[in-house]
Amino acid sequence: MSRAVGNAVVRNRVKRRLRALVAAGLPALPPGVDLVVRANAAAGTATFDDLRAAFDRCLPRALTKGRGASADAGVPGGAGPGGRP
């Protein structure tokens, strides 16, 4: 997590909040999906409810975009099996 999020106390608070959100959202993930969550600078001042709203808004979009990742398998620079490079 970038220092742009805040000092160590703030970064750890954001990390704990994001972990809780991801843990609650895991049942919605299809098997074999890798999820990467990145905190931007605004996450340091966001409330838990703000983070939850952003996560809930972004997760369906990420899952929709991720479905096409395996179509790039074998393409140089594209995703390999399971959406991994």
Image (cartoon, helix red, strand yellow):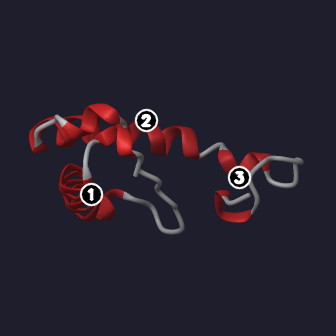
Q: Is residue 74 left or right of residue 27?
A: right
Q: Is residue 72 left or right of residue 38?
A: right
Of the numbered discs in the image, which one, if any, rests on residue 70?
A: 3
Q: Earlier in the sequence, mark 1 or mark 3?
A: 1
Measured as percent of width and height from the top left, residue 56 is found at: 26, 40
- Find numbered disc 2 in the image and state the secondary structure of the residue it sits on: helix
Q: How far is the residue under mark 2 from the one under mark 3?
A: 16 Å
Q: How far is the residue under mark 2 from the one under mark 1?
A: 22 Å
Q: Earlier in the sequence, mark 2 or mark 3?
A: 2
Of the numbered discs in the image, which one, if any, rests on residue 3?
A: none
Measured as percent of width and height from the top left, residue 66 is found at: 56, 45
Dividing the image into 4 quarters, which one contains the C terminus? bottom right
Of the numbered discs in the image, which one, if any, rests on residue 61?
A: 2
Q: Earlier in the sequence, mark 2 or mark 1?
A: 1
Measured as percent of width and height from the top left, residue 19 is found at: 26, 61
Compared to residue 74, the image places residue 58 above or below, namely above
Q: How far is the residue under mark 1 from the one under mark 3?
A: 29 Å
Graded by Cα atoms within 10 Å as few (under 14), some (14 to 19) or many (20 or more), the crowding at tag 1 reads some
Q: Quadrant of residue 61?
A: top left
Q: Nearer the viewer, residue 30 or 54?
A: 54
